[in-house]
Image: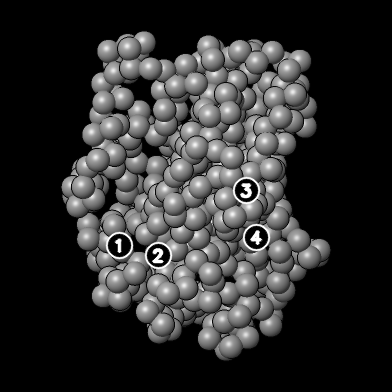
């Protein structure tokens, strides 16, 4: 296998960094490293598939294919052949850098979300040193000499159990979380420099996930004027905790960029951003039942296994928060994932269910129970368009009791029933308006009354991404997330 002797590439992902906040902080001269990089390069908008779900963005980049092809939209995926959920583990995605390594390019990978090691013997790969999004496999390092470098580095502060359930409206907690993120960024930057020095890769791909974690808990400190947060600070302006994390990342970026050769192509990017949010709405599943699209099995008709799940679900819903927090802090991740699956959604009566809601961390996801696709499908292919149309009509008409619309946009992921028959995605993706986050939420003309869940999070994912590019390629103003990997491959002068 020939060795690579061309120009080097340094790609740095800022997981969930918000483009508008980055531009704001650059204009305020708070991010000198990114400002210098932008002056030497150019700003690109990243066309991201995050409008389907944030869980699809990294698999899209790694595979170089669209969500409809690779099939990942969430950490939990629907298996129509088994009529059940399975947790995404990264095993179905072949990352583009595997082909680079096979062509003799020295590859360095550090904490790319959802990426599994490919067995590099040249360069380095460190997976889940600390990850916001985990596969469940835990820390993995290759090749063997690199393992000693990782072991010599202090553990990331966010691995400590007390950060599992941080409450965002407590200043003490946010001060501590900010300190842990900033220190974690510093340790990550130092480790990244050592990995590059030891592994001498031609292509380095590093990700800072600390911004993602911090943004979920601290977005109210970056956007205190949003209506979601009125009164939450007792009339006082919050400290700009999130800005501190951005500045810490910028400082480490400067050190990494400073260590590169002048002809190194550099990409610093985010595949999606963040915006204000208070958890996520929970009314979709009961509303679909009320409207006759879904039907939940009664306890008497359930098998003994399903009855046990139903009873435990009720018990779980009444478990005190401090008990839940203790469980998530002490139980292994693999165990919590396995135990969580049966409780993610109702036990449906598939013979009476035309459409159902999939578990979500943001958008509404609706899957049609389609014959020839779902094992227990009841909607005939010729009725697919009619069911989708009926759902869209009703969803667009949803309002609060005060008349505020609950739906912002609705996306159909399949152009027609022929495409839907092989689609792994939800059929309808519903983007909610701010009114859908009301607590409690009362829907006009409906008996469904719900509370949002996960309200300790004050930031939710936004679809827009960005890339600051310094290199020789001639580019337009926009690049698709699925094409970023191809851009890196072209810069290296290798073949996909």
Q: Residue at x 67, y 32 (%)?
A: 391
If you read the primary sequence from the N terminus, does the residue marked by circle 3 or circle 4 appear first? 3
Which labelled disc corresponds to residue 101? none
- Horizontal relation, residue 219 to residue 476: left or right: left
If you read the primary sequence from the N terminus, does the residue marked by circle 2 or circle 4 appear first? 2
Helix, strand or loop at mark 1: loop
Q: Residue at x 37, y 59 (%)?
A: 456
If you read the primary sequence from the N terminus, does the residue marked by circle 3 or circle 2 appear first? 2
Residue 84, picture quadrant = top left
Which labelled disc corresponds to residue 166? 1
- Horizontal relation, residue 269 to residue 440: left or right: right
Which residue, given by chain and number where applicable, does mark 3 sit on?
A: 399
Residues marked 4 and 1 touching at CB (< 8 Å): no
Residue 155, picture quadrant = bottom left
Which labelled disc corresponds to residue 464? 4
Badge 4 density bin: few <14, some 14–19, many ≥20, Cα 10 Å: many
Cα separation, mark 3 vs mark 2, equals 28 Å
Nearest to the eye among marks 3 and 4: give it. Answer: 3
Cα separation, mark 1 vs mark 2, equals 8 Å
Which residue, given by chain and number where applicable, does mark 2 sit on?
A: 217
Q: Is residue 472 visible?
A: yes
Residue 236 against residue 413 in the figure, above or below = below
Name, please, the residue furthest toward the bottom.
29
Nearest to the eye among marks 3 and 2: give it. Answer: 3
Residue 279, picture quadrant = bottom left
Nearest to the eye among marks 2 and 4: give it. Answer: 2
Nearest to the eye among marks 1 and 3: give it. Answer: 3
Cα separation, mark 3 vs mark 4, equals 27 Å
């Amino acid at each position: 296998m020939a060795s690579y002797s061309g120009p080097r590439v340094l790609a740095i992902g800022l997981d969930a960094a918000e483009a508008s906040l980055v531009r704001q902080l650059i204009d305020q001269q708070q991010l000198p490293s990114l400002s210098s990089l932008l002056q030497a390069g150019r700003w690109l908008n990243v066309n991201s598939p995050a409008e389907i779900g944030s869980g699809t963005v990294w698999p899209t980049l790694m595979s170089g294919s669209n969500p409809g092809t690779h099939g990942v939209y969430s950490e939990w995926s629907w298996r129509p052949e088994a009529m059940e959920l399975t947790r995404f583990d990264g095993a179905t995605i072949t990352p583009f850098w595997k082909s680079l390594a096979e062509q003799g390019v020295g590859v360095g990978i550090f904490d790319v979300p959802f990426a599994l090691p490919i067995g590099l013997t040249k360069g380095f790969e460190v997976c889940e040193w600390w990850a916001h999004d985990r596969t469940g496999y835990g820390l993995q390092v290759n090749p063997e000499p690199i393992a000693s470098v990782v072991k010599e580095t202090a553990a990331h502060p966010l691995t400590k159990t007390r950060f599992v359930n941080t409450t965002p409206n407590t200043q003490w907690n946010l001060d501590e979380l900010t300190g842990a993120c900033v220190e974690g960024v510093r340790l990550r930057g130092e480790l990244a420099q050592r990995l590059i020095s030891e592994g001498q890769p031609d292509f380095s791909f590093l990700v800072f996930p600390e911004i993602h974690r911090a943004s979920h808990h601290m977005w109210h400190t970056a956007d205190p004027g949003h209506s979601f947060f009125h009164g939450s600070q007792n009339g006082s302006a919050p400290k700009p905790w999130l800005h501190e994390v951005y500045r810490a990342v910028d400082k480490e970026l400067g050190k990494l960029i400073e260590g590169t050769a002048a002809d190194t192509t550099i990409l610093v990017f985010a595949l999606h951003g963040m915006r204000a949010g208070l958890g996520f709405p929970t009314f979709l599943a009961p509303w679909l039942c009320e409207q006759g699209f879904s039907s939940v099995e009664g306890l008497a008709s359930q098998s003994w296994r399903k009855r046990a799940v139903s009873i435990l679900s009720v018990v779980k819903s009444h478990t005190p928060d401090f008990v839940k927090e203790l469980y998530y802090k002490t139980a292994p991740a693999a165990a919590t994932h396995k135990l969580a699956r049966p409780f993610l959604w109702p036990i449906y009566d598939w013979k009476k269910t035309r459409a159902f809601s999939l578990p979500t961390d943001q958008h509404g996801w609706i899957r049609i129970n389609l014959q020839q696709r779902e094992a227990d499908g009841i909607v005939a292919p010729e009725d697919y368009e009619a069911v989708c149309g009926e759902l869209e009509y009703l969803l667009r008409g949803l309002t609060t009791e005060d008349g505020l619309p609950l739906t912002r946009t609705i996306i159909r992921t399949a152009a027609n029933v022929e495409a839907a028959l092989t689609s792994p995605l939800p059929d309808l993706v519903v983007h909610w308006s701010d009114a859908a986050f009301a607590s409690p939420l009362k829907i006009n003309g409906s008996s469904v009354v719900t509370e949002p869940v996960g309200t300790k999070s004050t930031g939710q994912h936004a679809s827009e991404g960005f890339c600051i590019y310094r290199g020789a390629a001639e580019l337009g103003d926009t690049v698709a997330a699925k094409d970023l990997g191809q851009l890196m491959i072209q810069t290296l002068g290798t073949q996909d």
